[in-house]
Amino acid sequence: MTIGIKDVARVAEVSPATVSRVLSGRSVDPAMHERVLAAVKSTGYRPNLAARRLRSQHTNTIGLIVADIRNPFFTAVSRAVEGLATARGMRVILCNTDEDPAREAAYLELMHEERVTGVIFAPCRQWIEKGERLEPGYPVVLIDRNLPSAGLDSVLLDNGNMAAELVAHLHAQGHRRVAGLFGASSTGTERRAGFEQAARALGMDASTLEMPHDAGAAERAVKELLAGPIRPDALVASNGVMLLSVLRALRGLQLGVPGDIALAGFDNNDWMEFVGGGLSVIEQPVEEIGRTAMTMLLDRLEHPDAPARRVVLAGRLITRGSSGPRASADQTIGA
């Protein structure tokens, strides 16, 4: 037989509401409090914590919705968020959308059902393009992607300027024909715009491709791109997952980096410095992004009516062998 609150109330000779108040930690008459606890023990009642959590307005739980957990960027950001949340006595529910709008909508609904304290959220492109305001009833901080019209706090990289810095570096190395592969997200769009603008300003011959969220898309695109009669001097990939796919494609084509083609991109994953002469990248301040997002969420809880803030962080250009001049390359990757 299932024991419920009514059974406890009958044994304690109090109302079910009094039992509920005792179990939720609210103040009641000391004598009643002791009777309820004794009744709980004698009946063996186990409170339904999930139901209590749904009724509560404060669960001390943070929702973290990321776009692609395979991407080490989101892994590192998640770790920073979780570390600060734990230090504040909060739990984290981690959800991965894989850039799927349906999964994203389901997870946002889950956050509502779980009555989370707040959400840190990297939205997919479709949500950004809708331009809709998100009014879930809990604070939201956007990471990596931004929509000013949403009226939400956000923290992201200075994507356009960082892409332009990569292009300027390749130009300084003597590369004049560049091709860029960019993800189908608002982040990819910002990096693509910065790439194209910088290439035009420097008089470079530039082309760009938008990559769908598909593990093999970048590899196929590189093979098609290099099958043409005019090969670019350099390739740029807009994230670390894509950079690995590009490198795999180049090795499959038996092309050396930078001897046959230069390569650069975003994210400074651990393996990148150990490949040949190393890969030139824009290193993102991933831990700072995670900590800043969590701090902004905590601030929003304390100041719910404050104006929305947008924090834009700079990355760091790390130059290695992969972007060196072709003519003077001493080392090649995959040669």
Image (spheres, rainbow, N blue to C red):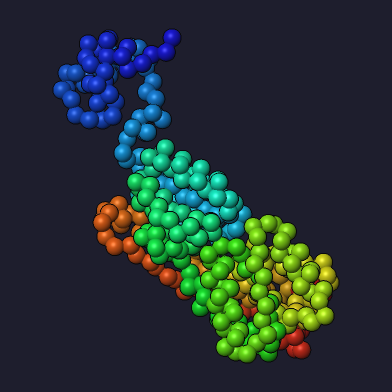
Tell me, yes or no, if residue 272 can be seen here.
no
- Residue at image position (33%, 62%) is 308
Is residue 314 left or right of 283 when viewed as pictured?
Answer: left
Q: Locate residue 110, reporting x and y percent.
A: 46, 40
Is residue 132 placed above or below 248 in the rendered structure? above
Foreground pick, 327 / 204 = 204
Q: Locate residue 43, reporting x and y percent.
A: 35, 12
- Residue 91's quadrant in the figure? top left
Is residue 264 left or right of 105 when viewed as pictured?
Answer: right
Is residue 197 left or right of 87 when viewed as pictured?
Answer: right
Is residue 22 placed above or below 220 in the rendered structure? above
Is residue 18 left or right of 109 when viewed as pictured?
Answer: left
- Residue at image position (65%, 87%) is 204
- Residue 154's quadrant in the figure? bottom left
Q: Locate residue 70, reporting x and y percent.
A: 61, 54
Foreground pick, 260 / 57 = 57
Tell me, yes or no, if residue 129 can be seen here.
yes
- Residue 257's quadrant in the figure? bottom right
Is residue 227 placed above or below 28 in the rendered structure? below
